[in-house]
Amino acid sequence: MTHEARDAGRAAGRSPKDPRPLWRQRDFGVFWAAQTLSVLGDSFALIALPLLVLEATGSIARMGLLTAVGGAAAVLAAVFAGTVVDRVDRRSLLIGCDLVRMVLYGLVPVVWLLDPHIWLLYVVLPVCEAVGMFFAVGYVTVVRALVGTEQLTEANGRLNATAAAAGVLGPLCAGVVAAWSGPAAAVGVDAASFGVSAACVAFVRFRPRPADDDQGSKKRPGLWQDLRVGAAFLRGHPVLRALTVLLCGFSFLTLGLNDLVIYHLKHDLGRDDGTVGTVMAVGALGTITGALLVARVRRRLGFGPTWTGAVAVCGLAFAGLGWASDVPAVALLSAAFLACVGMAGTCSMSLRQEVTPEHLLGRVTSAFWTLQYSVAPIGAAVLTWAAERRGTTPVALAAGTCCVLIAAAGLFTPIRRAGRA
């Protein structure tokens, strides 16, 4: 019997809609802490492991190769993650993902105490990045089981806000620990964070899936057919189809934004690395602000105006970045851009959770993310290549204008009236 089945008795008599505010819902609070710790561990690894490579080899190229291998593993895992998430007990999957990362990352400081082996990092990081993708898809699918559809946007806003905070705190703490006791010790702290996250998830009571969704039929479809289900659902739903297409273009234009900001600060404005870090920190505060405000804005304006308005402001902020001639202006525009990215992303995820059947949510989420980011790396390469040759001002203006046009295009799709029921 699965954990979810055992929780059926505990959940008996409890309404799918919990009237209590989120901060008073025990299961969501514990899950919130677990998800934050998991993101903290991921962000810790993104700094600690490259520092370990640099300490051992002194090669920036080797650092870049490690990051590239990890990113490729995550993209590949995204293709299959939804199929796996929809076939297994989701709580067991989340706990298993955290335990796998705890063990693998925990191997690194142990091996480093005996005899450092760089090749181990090129095994550990790709596996952990792939496992992290399974965790990410799994956590998206269980939020609705915790809070119901009425509080989805608020719950996602809080989860995204703390994830953004962890994304800032993780690298900062990793740098401090690495400077104090070495990068290997930072990786050990990373491993411990996943162990605590797994323990938290073990105490969360998820509502069981509907009986007809758990099995579907006696004969399950083949893997290839299963992989096509998520894409087919997106294609068949008018709003999700439009969102997928428009966000694919938006990701193509904006994935290289951080590189453009860094290049603008260092090359155009002649600032140092400390200034770059400060601007990135201010931008992260924008992400947190947008995530906390999105539920209130969506309730007042509705999904369509919130999403299209956020994307339009993203475009205006992006266009202005190339013209900004002082650091405070760059920081404020970066914060505005990231705040609106957070609002648009939270709205998109919440709507997808609301309209997708429970038994398809993993595959639909996986397909959505895979399609959304399918051409984004190419866009980042084009954006940075153009900025190097033409300058940041015309490139930022062109990309920002295209983002505004994407928002305008959304007004001529079903997105405009989405979420009004």
Image (tube, rainbow, N blue to C red):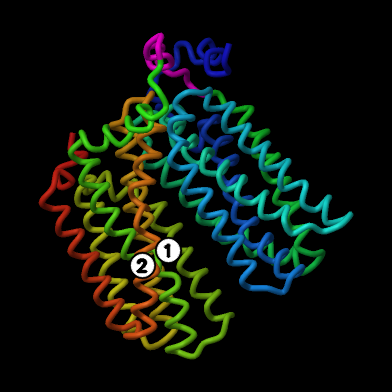
Measured as percent of width and height from the top left, residue 114 is found at 89, 54
In the image as oriented, which residue stretches furthest toward the left?
A: 412
User: Which of the 4 quarters of the picture holds residue 45?
Assistant: bottom right
**Viewer-side residue, 178 vs 385:** 385
Q: Secondary structure at mark 1?
A: helix
Instruction: Report which residue position mark 2 lands on.
Output: 336
Tag 2–tag 1 contact (CB < 8 Å):
yes
User: Which of the 4 quarters of the picture holds residue 261?
Assistant: bottom left
Judge from the rendering whether residue 246 lies leftward or rightward of residue 115; answer left or right. left
Q: Secondary structure at mark 2?
A: helix
Residue 21 in view (yes/no): no
In the image as oriented, which residue stretches furthest toward the right?
A: 114
The magenta region covers 206-219
For the point 27% across and 58% down, the residue is 249
Give the Cα distance between marks 2 and 1.
6 Å
Instruction: Report which residue position mark 1 lands on.
Output: 286
Q: Quadrant of the C terminus?
A: top left
Q: Amino acid at mark 1?
A: Gly
For the point 34% across and 46% down, the residue is 295
User: In terms of sequence position, does the residue under pointer 2 or pointer 1 come before the other?
Assistant: 1
In the picture shown, does residue 151 fall above or below 259? above
Measured as percent of width and height from the top left, residue 400 is found at 26, 71
Q: Amino acid at mark 2?
A: Ala
